[in-house]
Amino acid sequence: MTTATQFEKQETQVIENREPKSGSKLLLESIAAQGVDFIFGYPGGAIMPVYDELPNYPQLNHILCRHEQGCGMAAIGYARATGKVGTAFATSGPGATNLVTAIADAYLDSVPVVFVTGQVPTNLMGTDAFQEVDIIGITMPIVKHSYIARDPADLPGMIAEAYFIAAEGRPGPVLIDIPKDVQNALTTDRHKWRPYPKQKPEMGQSADISKAEDLIRDAKKPLFYIGGGVAQGDGVAELRELVELTGIPGVSTLKGLGALPSGHPNYLGMLGMHGLRAANYAVQECDLLIVVGARFDDRATGKLDTFAPDAKVIHMDIDIAEINKLRTVDVGLDGSLKKNLAALDPFGGGAAPNIGEWLELCYGRREKHEWDYEAAQAKAAPGIYAPKLLHDLSRKADESAIFTCDVGQHQMWVAQHCYFDDPKDHITSGGLGTMGFGLPAGLGAKLGAPNRTVITVSGDGSIMMNIQELATLFRYDIPLKIVLLDNSVLGMVRQWQEVFFDKNYSETNLDDNPDFALLAKAFQIDAFTVHTEGEVEAGIDRLLAAKGPILMHVKIDPNENVWPLVPPGRSNADMMER
């Protein structure tokens, strides 16, 4: 990961400019120069000079979300749907602290976002002034880099560097804190503050390619373990070519979904705590694990010392700090995933060794454990069976549809039962697991990809955390489609209480929920409720046909659980079923 110390210091250069410009003007001018088209923000006292200048920049489409956390999550959704750097504004104090969860979410999921916060005037900093917090200190562990602007002349160089740092290497959030007096101050100088590359530096391929090729050539039961870094490293096409070349099957993490299309013949499914049986069994029995852009997260590995116990490991990651961090590897390939994947040619253009018995075992299990929706629904309680609804919705939606979702049971059902042809088709909070993510991320994704259908899947617990963003949908007429799965309970917590806490259902009952369809209509959003299985097909059709924002409220059984489930501290081979 890049830090400011990697940029060589040089003496400040000053460009004379006869026209005095304020810090606010330089800030917005510099952001516009980065090609930013959307800013998600919320004004306040310490950032008012910036907002006073903002109407002079019509190319910067400002989206007024209704909570700063919503601003941050929308910027993340925009960044993940477009591959560009997201941008969010907030004022000092509570405005800045309301961004913290979004900053942490971007950090843990490696999402490039520049967060700009107002700050009290420099002469008041450190005095416990009104709405003063040390947002730099608060966020230090969850940013790639952060700045306090002291001189308005520094802003052009600072902004350019911030957007570069957010996007290069392993992406992540950058914070810029600007005191109010710096926003107001006039300057005729333009500091070339630090040198920075005009483009991302070209990362080379690893020198250990031949060692990895030897391991692949000798393996009898090889397996790809695919993470979110594949998409972030622009290596999707190269991964698919390598899979075709070698015939090796693959499994993916939650963030790796779509790197291999859900219907790809070599794809076994998601691995981990709620992974599919074919995927988890393959990991446990492989003799070579080719890890591509994944980080051995605990939700993916289960008990780490039992994960792929007999496998040699090739680990490919842009961040060298991830290699050997949790699992000692046989070959580590840092640097460009795209170049490393393209360079791998283990068979020298010839035929791949016969791994037919391994493939027969893997694909036989996939077929054996393929989801039978009719049989599963027959075993479930009467009413609407959420996995089948999501499967049918995914199949009916156009191929370019993007799903954003919150965190909980519905998140796992989306991962298990929806079809994704590209990593940008699936946007969820992975590392932080943030409830309230789906709605603002969905509106950000839709603004970033206006020609694509965007569907947010939420739960009755999650949606209440940022439900105010329904007002943002109405204000800007953002045609987001929302599926709200309502079981009147905090479903995933209740499931764990049932399975691991002797059915002690403590503080998970939400049976006093509002009428969500009526609530959405109060925000002037089209909404309807689906109560029975017989109403699902027509409900999906109505949802997909809507031209504006719409919410489909779906009542489901509070006792339905997500299966399979790997108990905490257990091997991924120890999957519990219904």
Image: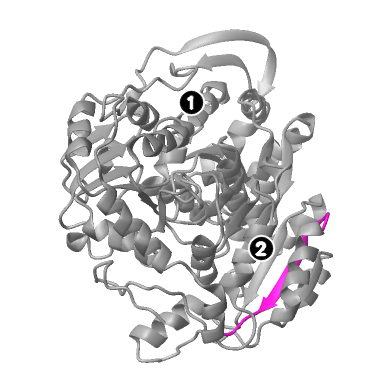
For badge 1, the amino acid type reads Glu
Question: Magenta span has 1?
Answer: no
Residue that numbered label 2 is attached to: 393
Residue that numbered label 1 is attached to: 161
Depicted 275 relative to depicted 29: above or below: below
Question: Circle 1 — which element?
Answer: helix
Question: Circle 2 — which element?
Answer: helix
- Pinpoint residue 257: horizontal percent, then vertical percent: 47, 51
Give the side of residue 341 with respect to residue 207, left or right.
Answer: right
Looking at this view, is 161 or 127 the one in front?
161
- Provide the residue span drawn in magenta: 546-559
Colour scheme in the image? one colour
Q: Quadrant of the C terminus?
A: bottom left
- What residue appears at the point 45 percent right and 22 percent down from the top-left corner? 200
Which of discs 1 and 2 lies nearer the camera? The answer is 2
Give the side of residue 143 with respect to residue 225, left or right.
Answer: right
